[in-house]
Image (cartoon, helix red, strand yellow):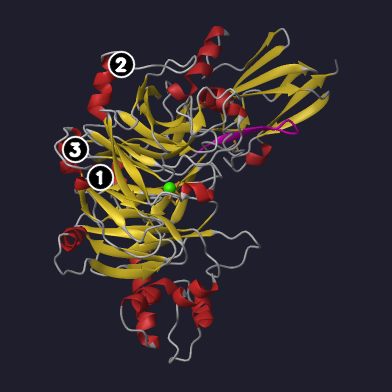
Amino acid sequence: MSEKESKNSPQAPEKGGLSRRGFLGASAMTGAAVAATAFGSAVMTRESWAAAVKDAQQKIHVAPGELDDYYGFWSGGHQGEVRVIGVPSMRELMRIPVFNVDSATGWGLTNESKHIMGESAKFQNGDCHHPHISMTDGKYDGKYLFINDKANSRVARIRLDIMKCDKMLTVPNVQAIHGLRLQKVPHTKYVFANAEFVIPHPNDGKNFDLQSKDSYTMFNAIDAEKMEMAFQVIVDGNLDNTDADYTGKYAAATCYNSEKAYDLGGMMRNERDWVVVFNIERIEAAIKAGKFTTIGDSKVPVVDGREGSELTRYIPVPKNPHGCNTSSDGKYFIANGKLSPTVTMIEIAKLDDLFAGKLKEPRDVVAAEPELGLGPLHTTFDGRGNAYTTLFIDSQVVKWNMADAVRAYQGEKVNYIKQKLDVQYQPGHLHASLTETSEADGKWLIALCKFSKDRFLPTGPLHPENDQLIDISGDEMKLVHDGPTYAEPHDCILARRDQIKTRKIWERNDPYFAPTVAMAKKDGINLETDNKVIRDGKKVRVYMTSMAPTYGITEFNVKQGDEVTVTITNIDQIEDVSHGFVMVNHGASMEISPQQTSSITFIADKPGLHWYYCSWFCHALHMEMVGRMLVEPA
Ligand code: CUK
Ligand code: CUA
Ligand code: CA
């Protein structure tokens, strides 16, 4: 990457006698000046550089005690969580464990979280890429955030009122859920999820031939409210990214492995791959009419959407496309070229004719194929007719005008490229504020760069990534902030702060811990008042309350080998007074926030005295919030 580095590394003003490294030392706001150099004068004066830095600082400064304008939800990539980040300050507000195990909250350890994870709780890893917020009439309704797990083929839902994962589903009959988007209109009835890899069916070890007709992957629709499978669609080739339109009729997905190859060379053999468009109405009608099959013991309706099907259309695009983005004006599905320097704009208004057989060939729906630069991966929109595309190889974000691109495609001499901004370095996704909705407001853009190289203090061989904040409110893009992130966000989403409404304390009847409440009821326990130990053979259930700075039970007895379930109800009513429970040397840890009930089960396998303590600092006497488990030897 040395050539890239010399081309794209930001250059501080040389005439001012200040080296680039000097500037990095002087200020973290180098980005603003980078933006300025990228846009205009090759040589900045020391004064203009300083002014640009100051301007950037003001733009993102959220003073102590002030609140951000946007909620950002960042995927945690193969780390497995979702991170909540305030924009424009880029301050991390919260982490939501999803496909990982988290010792602060007890996610993956508590009975409540294991109940939500179901069978898949046995996996302690995940790989999430695409966080998306539920919508009504093409606008965020703030109810849920959905996210994929490529590693273990799952889709999870986060309830945004409590910012906890409340449902998790393993998609059957497929491998590696990658692209994920939501139906926008009339509301998010379906979560669309692409299974990336082609596998044999049945995958029983008797057939390993990917070219066989029995080898395929599927496009998946999940009922967003129930979090159950709605249907699966067999496709040709593989599936990468997806998006839905603003009529509710169509979803589209990119395919980079139309070859159904098993290696790199094979996957690049065809000059063109395709975008497959799904006709949601027709698929629903087919299923209603009973025209579907099922696979193995799965009850999920499966329809065949391969070439020749009335349910899909295949639109050839240059080889190995990646991102698939619906423009916020609802006009286009945009397939990002990756190996081709172009993006393909598919005109959604022409899809009715394509499905009705009124067009000569599928490519007749292509409205334009603008050439943007090297390695286009994803595109986002400002609601003013401009699109912004990441150029992975060029390490740039290119701003271009969609209407101009269409005019150029029709033969007019018009320059549709408005600006190219260097970013640091190698961007994957990018995301403009509210871009996935009809309310795209063109204020902020996040460029999620895969490499940070020299932008931060060194952290050993493993570097952070760099999620850069870019101001797009004016005519020029301006880079205003470098945001180091841990592996590997891939993607993020921004919502206005008024679109997300959270609870301050739990409701006692929250379904999140309903199974635990049901268990207590069977034991005749009133969770808000009772402090009792119930012995049930080798199972011991300890019920207690917590109120700063004490547990309702500070000593209980069990026998070695007992399976102990500790259930704690935090009866504090005061916002922010969360308690914890850690049983020392037993791998047990959990959060109990105000009015929450949490439970955790472990084996009391060691005789003796074992302390438990509160792990969330709740009171001046937090350290004294302790108790003892006394284990009698077997
Ligand atoms: S993918 Cu990672 S840069 Cu999973 Cu959305 Cu394109
Ligand atoms: Cu309760 Cu700390
Ligand atoms: Ca290919």
Separation (CA) of disc 2 from disc 3: 22 Å
Q: Secondary structure at mark 1?
A: loop
Q: Is residue 403 visible?
A: yes
Residue type at mark 2: give it: Lys
Q: Are marks 2 and 3 in contact (CB under 8 Å)?
A: no
The image quarter in which residue 444 lies: bottom left
Q: Which contiguous range is marked in magenta?
A: 577-589
Q: Of the two numbered discs 3 and 1 on the same chain, state the one appearing first in sequence.
A: 3
- The residue to which callout 1 is attached is 437
Q: Residues within 10 Å of mark 1 (few under 14, many from 20)?
A: many
- x%, y% of residue 317? 32, 49
Q: Of the two numbered discs 2 and 3 on the same chain, state the one appearing first in sequence.
A: 2
Rendering quadrant holding ligand 2: top right
Separation (CA) of disc 2 from disc 1: 34 Å
Q: What numbered label is drawn on residue 354?
A: 3
Residue type at mark 3: give it: Leu
- x%, y% of residue 37? 36, 79
